[in-house]
Amino acid sequence: MSKYQDVIMAGFGGQGVMLIGNLLAQAGMEQGINVTFIPVYGAEMRGGTANCTVVLDSLPIGSPLVHEPLSTIVLNEPSLAKFQPRLRKDGVQVVNTSLIAEHLVDAAIRTVRIPANGMAHELGNAKLANMVALGAWLRATEALPLKAVRDALRRVVSAHYAGLIPVNAAALDAGYNFA
């Protein structure tokens, strides 16, 4: 039996969407799971909407393309508008309520509402919102153990920023515990 999970992560360029996608993919590989990671960026890297897709499966992955995702992490309103309609009816979305108005969230969809920016600010670094959201997604989907993702931080965050690993781990924990 396949253990399959996919996620589309989306936000403004510069919110760290690619970082959390890369982190999730790395953690999946380290857990012995088949993984695909597709980043979508370019001219929209700074300020525009950027997204990535990660597929995790215990079986070989037939296609890395996901048209109707099982889950999403949306960090801003344009991303919600783009990806919420594509989410499977039985899927789950993690929504950053710091930047997304409540009335825009479809009440029929299982949603983890998390004030990711506010929590990141409380942790002392506004750039941690991506990690807070990823922690919440890990709790909501149980796709990978939190510890596996925390451990993978050392291989994804460059040595130049090694001092930021503990705060990123704390942000993952905060999001996980919130969800």
Image (tube, grey):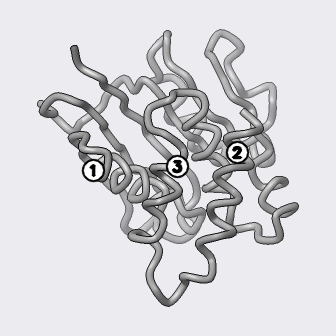
Contact, mark 2 vs mark 1 (Cβ under 8 Å): no
Q: Indicate the quadrant containing the N terminus: top left, top right, bottom left or bottom right.
A: top left
- Residue 42: x %, y % from top left: 36, 67
Question: At label 2, which amino acid type do we have?
Answer: Gly
Contact, mark 3 vs mark 2 (Cβ under 8 Å): no
- Residue 68: x %, y % from top left: 36, 23
C-alpha span from label 1 to label 3: 14 Å
**Which residue corresponds to mark 1?**
29
- Residue 93: x %, y % from top left: 58, 29
Question: In percent of the image, x 30 and y 38: which residue is there?
Answer: 55
In this picture, residue 116 sits left or right of residue 6: right
- Secondary element under disc 3, as helix, strand or loop, is helix
Give the foreground label among 3 and 2. 3
Question: In percent of the image, x 51 and y 57: which residue is there?
Answer: 17
Query: Residue 136 occupies which quadrant of the picture?
Result: top right
**Which residue corresponds to mark 2?**
175
